[in-house]
Image (cartoon, helix red, strand yellow):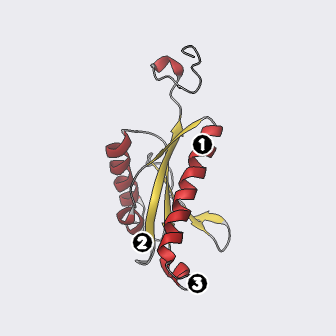
Amino acid sequence: MTIPLDTNDDVGIYDDAVHSMARPPRDASETIRLNAASVSELTGAVAGTTVQFLADPTRLAACYVNHETLLWRDAGAMTAILCLTAEALGLTAVPLGRHGDEIVQSCGLPARVKGVGAVHIGSRPPADQGIADPARDHSGR
């Protein structure tokens, strides 16, 4: 699920049946509000987009014993890959350290769908704002 901090943008939910983004079943203004409060509390960010991971554990439970471990390993792998990709594209990415169940449920998804983590992505601030990128500062080496 993608959740913008800007209320003029749309929330999108990935539809695996057609491999595209869809609108949530319910008005997403509460989803945007809950996410913005969480992102602000955890990071202080005022712009960007949150990628909220969601899962239907019943699908995994039908195939695997101890399916929860697979679910959380997949969520961790997705978090890592998303952060690495954002870095490669010159963006910032912050794992939010939340499950996000309340945010997921606020847009009308079935109760069985659970939040399994989130990453907030944004652009890098200009260098003149005094926030240095330590990976690019080679003066102290």
The residue indicated by pointer 2 is 108
Mark 1 against mark 3, which lies toward the viewer? Answer: 3
Q: Position of residue 56 (x, y in %)?
A: 50, 75
Local secondary structure at mark 1 = helix
Q: Quadrant of residue 60?
A: bottom right
Residue under label 3: 63
Q: How many marks?
A: 3
Q: Nearer the viewer, mark 1 or mark 2?
A: 1
Name of the residue lying farthest toward the front: 141
Furthest residue in direction top, as rendered:
139
- The residue where tag 1 is placed is 86
Identity of the residue drawn at 54% across and 80% down: 59
Mark with earlier residue (1, 3)? 3
Q: Amino acid at mark 2?
A: Gly
Q: Would you say the residues marked 1 and 3 are in contact, meaning their CB atoms lie under 8 Å apart? A: no
Which tag, 1 or 2, sits closer to the chain's start? 1
Residue at x 40%, y 77% (from the top left corner): 111
Callout 3 amino acid? Cys
Residue 23 sits above or below residue 130 on the image: below
Depth check: 21 or 128 in front? 128
